[in-house]
Amino acid sequence: MRLPTLKWAGDALELVDQTLLPSELVIKRCDSAEEVRDAIHRLVVRGAPAIGVAAAYGVLLAAHSAKNSSPEELREHVARAAELLAAARPTAVNLAWAVRRMEAAAQGQEASAQELYERLEREAKAIEEEDREANRRLGKFGAALLEDGATVLTHCNAGALATVDYGTALGVVYAAVEEGKNVSVYVDETRPLLQGARLTAWELTQAGIPATLICDDMAASVMSQGKVDCVVVGADRVAANGDAANKIGTLNLAILARHFLVPFYVAAPLSTVDFDMASGADIPIEERNPEEVTSFAGARFAPVGVDVYNPAFDVTPAYLIDAVIMEGGVAKPPLGAALAALRRD
Ligand code: MRU
């Protein structure tokens, strides 16, 4: 059973509250753009594609509250919500990308507020549907890279919970399993917020796919024993040259994978590629609350007064990436040229 991570309810956005998984499965209802912004910031909904789709519905909620006013007023609501939502998290480009698409859909001088609202609803639903399709297509391309019996190592959660309902890195695993291959997965716990232990391990267990949880610092040992056939991770933003930002700790894995000659794959839809960003050096890296490092679930384990550095993402340079698996095909080095060839516009 794969739950939809988010659902548009006509006048509200329903989200699986990922801060509570796996102990509790609670649906959080958001009635306004502000609530969606808060949900994105608190990681109630997280993962690059999922926050893009959630933000699109956040903009739609702002339009919903203005659909009986003038088109100008509706557009003002949309512009305010777009600004608020785009600033909720800085690293995943899908967020800004989805919000820009919604703003563009609200243009058109001749339309009434009701017509603009309907246009916005169609656009948000299109963004959601494109994510479903992109994941399934990239999953199939990625599955071709996995042999029957393969063992994959993954980091964080780039699964159904990070997208609308299927996943990018885990989409590759699901597609291979759907093709009849036996695939097992080593799951990095992913400190500090344990998206691997809480979310990926839960998703794979629900799907009946063999999953082995390891602490992040065990990856070198596992790879050194020849137990990993490839690493597959997601991405929050891929620069035009192929440098890829993903959950902190991904860079460690890429370096290890190169050392142990294990293929390192990034699975990401085109909406995660930022062709305006020449290299990963310019990708904004979110820094989060120090308490995420000093405590867990409210229990503090580090001494008061210690300094903390808590970047949520790191950037893996293109030269450590063996392929970017996308809905249009598999981009292989040189990644810059391969990504440009898969670009649609
Ligand atoms: O901080 P998070 O949980 O939003 O980080 C998520 C990741 O790093 C994912 O790997 C990435 O967004 C890709 S999701 C398909």
Image (cartoon, helix red, strand yellow):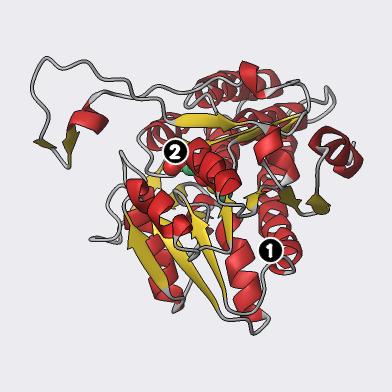
Which residue sits at x=56%, y=19%? 83
Position of residue 1 measured from the top left corner of the image (x, y, whole percent) = 46, 75
Position of residue 229 measured from the top left corner of the image (x, y, whole percent) = 58, 64
Would you identify the image quadrant in which residue 48 lies?
A: top right
Q: Is residue 284 left or right of residue 292?
A: right
Alpha carbon distance from label 1 to label 2: 23 Å
Some atom of ligand 1 lies within 8 Å of the CB belonging to the residue at label 1:
no
Position of residue 274 measured from the top left corner of the image (x, y, whole percent) = 72, 29
Reading the image, the residue beneath label 1 is: 139
Q: Which mark is residue 91?
A: none
* Residue placed most toward the observer, 61 or 212: 212
Position of residue 17 measured from the top left corner of the image (x, y, whole percent) = 35, 51
* Residue placed most toward the observer, 104 or 45: 45
Would you identify the image quadrant in which residue 129 lies?
A: bottom right
Question: In terms of sequence position, does the residue under pointer 1 or pointer 2 come before the other?
Answer: 1
Q: Nearer the viewer, mark 1 or mark 2?
A: 2
Q: Is residue 296 left or right of residue 222?
A: left
Which residue sits at x=80%, y=38%? 335
Q: Mark 1 falls on what kind of element?
A: helix
Would you identify the image quadrant in which residue 60 lies?
A: top right
Would you say residue 165 is visible in this rendering? no
> What amino acid does circle 1 point to?
Gly
Which residue sits at x=82%, y=33%? 336
Q: Residues within 10 Å of mark 1 (few under 14, many from 20)?
A: many
Q: Is residue 115 above or below residue 138?
A: above
